[in-house]
Amino acid sequence: MEDNILEVQSMKKHFPIKKGFFKRVVGQVKAVDDISFYVKAGETFGLVGESGCGKSTLGKSLLRAIEPSSGSVKFKNRNNEMVDVMDLDQKGLRDIRRDMQLIFQDPYSSLNPRMTVLNIIGEPLICNKIAKGNELRERVKHLMEIVGLNSRHLERYPHAFSGGQRQRIGIARALATNPKFLVCDEAVSALDVSIQAQIINLLEDLQKSLNLSYLFISHDLGVIQHISDRVGVMYVGKLVEMTTTEELFSNPKHPYTEALLSAKPMPNPRLKKERIILKGEVANPAKPPSGCYFHPRCPYAKEICKLEAPSLNEVKDGHHVACHFASELDLKGTVAI
Ligand SMILES: Nc1ncnc2c1ncn2[C@@H]1O[C@H](COP(=O)(O)OP(=O)(O)OP(=O)(O)O)[C@@H](O)[C@H]1O
Ligand code: SF4
Ligand SMILES: [Mg+2]
């Protein structure tokens, strides 16, 4: 599609499980297992799912921050050329990383405590030989201003800043090379709720003013609902549902999505809803169940679910679901957004 900035096809990342003195490979953790999706230019694609389902592995794999096992990642670079990130050599990767950046989860551990803010934010500009000296200082000051930091504080160290301010430093650093696409991995999860809202507002403002596209990863459905245009739901390394935010929350078609939504706190606590308690544990990605990975926990499972894995099919315009009974089940969403 012409207006897509990112197209991911059949992405897999399997981590080998090694045992014994000779480190023999005895199995694979299928952290990301055959995932395809796209992100349109200027949109926010939200990725949600329980801890360990593979969200971070997917985010890092598509930037090749870790090397995927297989798949293709097409990305529209700053010259509007669609390039396959998987085909790039080290130099090509360095170039493309100016256009695609990652914002980390934890503003406390992701900033080097021995570097000043000037050096933290300026590092990508120095490494890519984009600016130095006075020009570097001016660019860092400008970046600090656009993320809402006082640019007079550029010689300070990270410990002098609050959690929210540190996340702003992380965002300024990610923006230093004028990227077009950001992977935000749990970018607000470590912050207090009121600070979360400020950072989300900042990301939304920056998206508009700088024409950015986001892959926004979170386990928090409230945050995902607020910020995303479309959402993908992951379960044990696979995408099980993908559609617009409004459609997902009002008309879910996968039983796992329905269960996740039923556990989401309501904006108005007087509006009661029935919570679906899922039996059993999240499946182990090193030893997933047969057929549909969700079958041991699914309240709607039938015999075929144990035998055959459902593929992700488009059941309605732009609404993709991996469930044998997606068209038949009448599932509950949350109240309209
Ligand atoms: N380097 C690694 N070696 C082996 N297994 C790994 C490695 N990194 C991740 N995994 C496994 O891959 C699976 C997916 O992990 P990942 O961190 O991507 O999940 P996540 O959805 O981001 O979880 P969280 O919400 O807790 O951040 C997990 O089972 C994890 O244990
Ligand atoms: S395929 Fe079967 S087990 Fe899987 S989600 Fe659908 S009904 Fe449940
Ligand atoms: Mg993660």
Image (tube, rainbow, N blue to C red):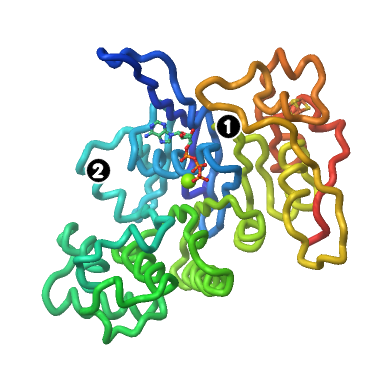
Residue at left 19%, top 66%? 114
Left or right: where does residue 262 sit relative to residue 181? right
- Residue 168 is situated, as x and y percent measured from the top left of the image, at 40, 71
Sequence-first tag of 2 and 1: 2
Task: Label 2, secondary structure: give it.
Answer: helix
Left or right: where does residue 327 sit relative to residue 91? right
Total marks in image: 2
Q: In which quarter of the image is the C terminus?
A: bottom right
- Residue 92 is situated, as x and y percent measured from the top left of the image, at 25, 43
Judging by the rendered image, the residue that carries numbered circle 2 is: 92
Judging by the rendered image, the residue that carries numbered circle 1 is: 236
- Residue 223 is situated, as x and y percent measured from the top left of the image, at 61, 60
Within 10 Å of the Cα at label 2, are there few (<14), some (14-19), or many (20+) other Cα atoms? few
Labels 2 and 1 touching (C-beta < 8 A): no
Task: Label 1, secondary structure: give it.
Answer: loop
Query: What type is the residue that disc 2 sits on?
Result: Gly
Question: In the displayed structure, would residue 214 be above or below residue 81?
Answer: below
Residue 118: mark in rendering: none
Question: In the displayed structure, would residue 319 be above or below residue 188?
Answer: above
Name the one closer to the observer, 107 or 168: 107
Whether disc 1's CB lies below 8 Å from ligand 1 is answered no
Disc number lying in front (2 or 1) = 1
Name the one closer to the observer, 315 or 161: 161
Within 10 Å of the Cα at label 1, are there few (<14), some (14-19), or many (20+) other Cα atoms? many
What separation in Å lies between label 2 and label 1 (alpha carbons)? Answer: 32 Å
Name the one closer to the observer, 196 or 320: 196
Query: What type is the residue that disc 1 sits on?
Result: Val
Q: In which quarter of the image is the N terminus?
A: top right
- Residue 135 is situated, as x and y percent measured from the top left of the image, at 17, 77
Residue at left 24%, top 79%? 154
Whether disc 2's CB lies below 8 Å from ligand 1 is answered no
Give the quarter of the image for residue 307: top right
